[in-house]
């Protein structure tokens, strides 16, 4: 596979996207923060099938990290990322600099008022404001027809969908099922932080979701009972701290006490200092 072309500035990216659009080419886009794994490669492969031009962005976005979070040590491997991008048939890697994305005096942010509340939004104040803002800025430069996101970041996917709808962005947003390790752990760049012992313990997250899905399939509708079941499985796996285990309506993300329609069980759990998230959609009667 040929190496992708690298574009570094919003101005150049935007001009290139305009030219593709004038030529009638369909732009597929995968935004990432780099340190690509098989989950990202799956998003790129999906993008390849959905566009004539495939753009990957790599930008570790400072505004979505809290002051105590891992911005400075977020894992980076540009050479490895470029090799994976090439292997997945990426045409362009957009690599903007923080100074270009947030010029001095930057004061414009995008907030998706309700979907940002609760779950990770409650535990990571400002996180989704940062995500929505950077995704909007990336869309302005890349001008995609279709953008591909992982369902592992379930709340992020709902926030982006709503932003695109509310701001008439005209981008098709596609969610792709979570890619998992053989023991069920959701692939994540942050898995690189885990010690071998933490990594082994973290497999309880998937077992917890599976236990809840099985109980729901057997007819359990009580959200508190399903959360208690999942929490018990996680506690058995030896987490350092459970941040949350919750069930919410699958599209509004409002709390539900009974699972009578599509709902999402979402969880965030610390192993050592590493906070992992995962989720499963419960669709009763499906
Ligand atoms: O999911 C991610 O990697 C990031 O949140 C995103 C969408 C690239 C925005 O920085």
Image (spheres, helix red, strand yellow):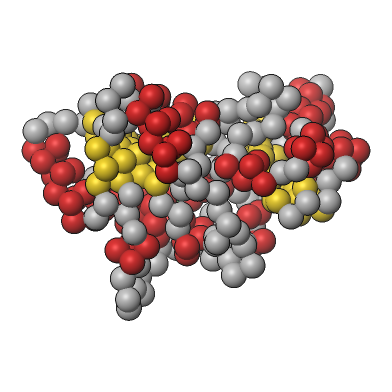
The quarter in which the N terminus is drawn is top left
Which of 137 and 121 lies nearest the eye of the viewer? 137
Q: Position of residue 195 (x, y in %)?
A: 75, 43
The quarter in which the C terminus is drawn is top right
- Identify whether 46 is placed above or below 165: above
Q: Position of residue 223 (x, y in %)?
A: 78, 41
Say left or right for 26 vs 123.
left
Q: Which residue occupies 9% across, 33% down?
A: 23
Say left or right for 24 vs 40.
left
Q: Toward which corner of the image does residue 266 lie, by quadrant?
A: top right
- In this rendering, does residue 92 appear at all? yes
Q: Which residue occupies 53% across, 33% down?
A: 37
Q: Position of residue 12 (x, y in %)?
A: 18, 51
- In this rendering, does residue 114 appear at all? no
- Identify whether 66 is placed above or below 40: below
Say left or right for 47 vs 175.
left
Q: Which residue occupies 37% across, 62% down?
A: 98
- Identify whether 157 is placed above or below 51: below
Residue extending furthest toward the bottom: 105
Number of dots carrying numbers:
0
Q: Position of residue 278 (x, y in %)?
A: 66, 40
Residue extending furthest toward the front: 79
Say left or right for 165 vs 92.
right
Q: Toward which corner of the image does residue 103 lie, by quadrant?
A: bottom left
Q: Which residue occupies 39% across, 67% down?
A: 109
């Amino acid at each position: 596979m040929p190496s992708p072309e690298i574009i570094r500035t919003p101005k150049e990216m935007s001009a290139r996207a305009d030219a593709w659009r004038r030529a009638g080419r369909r732009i597929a886009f995968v935004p990432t923060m780099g340190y690509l794994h098989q989950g990202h490669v799956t998003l790129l492969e999906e993008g390849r099938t959905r566009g004539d031009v495939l753009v990957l962005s790599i930008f570790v976005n400072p505004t979505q990290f809290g002051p105590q979070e891992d911005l400075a040590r977020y894992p980076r491997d540009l050479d490895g990322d470029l090799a994976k991008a090439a292997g997945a048939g990426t045409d362009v890697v957009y690599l903007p600099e923080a100074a270009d994305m947030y010029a001095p005096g930057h004061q414009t942010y995008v907030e998706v008022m309700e979907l940002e509340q609760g779950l990770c939004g409650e535990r990571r104040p400002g996180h989704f404001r940062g995500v929505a803002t950077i995704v909007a800025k990336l869309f302005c430069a890349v001008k995609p027809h279709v953008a591909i996101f992982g369902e592992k970041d379930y709340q992020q996917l709902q926030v982006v969908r709503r932003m695109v709808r509310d701001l008439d962005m005209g981008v098709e947003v596609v969610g792709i099922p979570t890619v998992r390790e053989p023991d069920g752990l959701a692939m994540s760049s942050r898995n690189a932080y885990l010690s071998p012992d933490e990594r082994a313990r973290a497999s309880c997250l998937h077992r917890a979701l599976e236990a809840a899905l099985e109980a729901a399939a057997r007819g359990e509708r009580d959200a508190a009972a399903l959360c208690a079941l999942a929490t018990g499985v996680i506690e058995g796996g030896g987490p350092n701290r459970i941040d949350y285990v919750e069930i919410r309506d699958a599209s509004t993300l409002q709390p539900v006490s009974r699972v009578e329609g599509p709902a999402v069980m979402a969880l965030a759990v610390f192993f050592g200092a590493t906070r992992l998230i995962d989720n499963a959609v419960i669709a009763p009667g499906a």
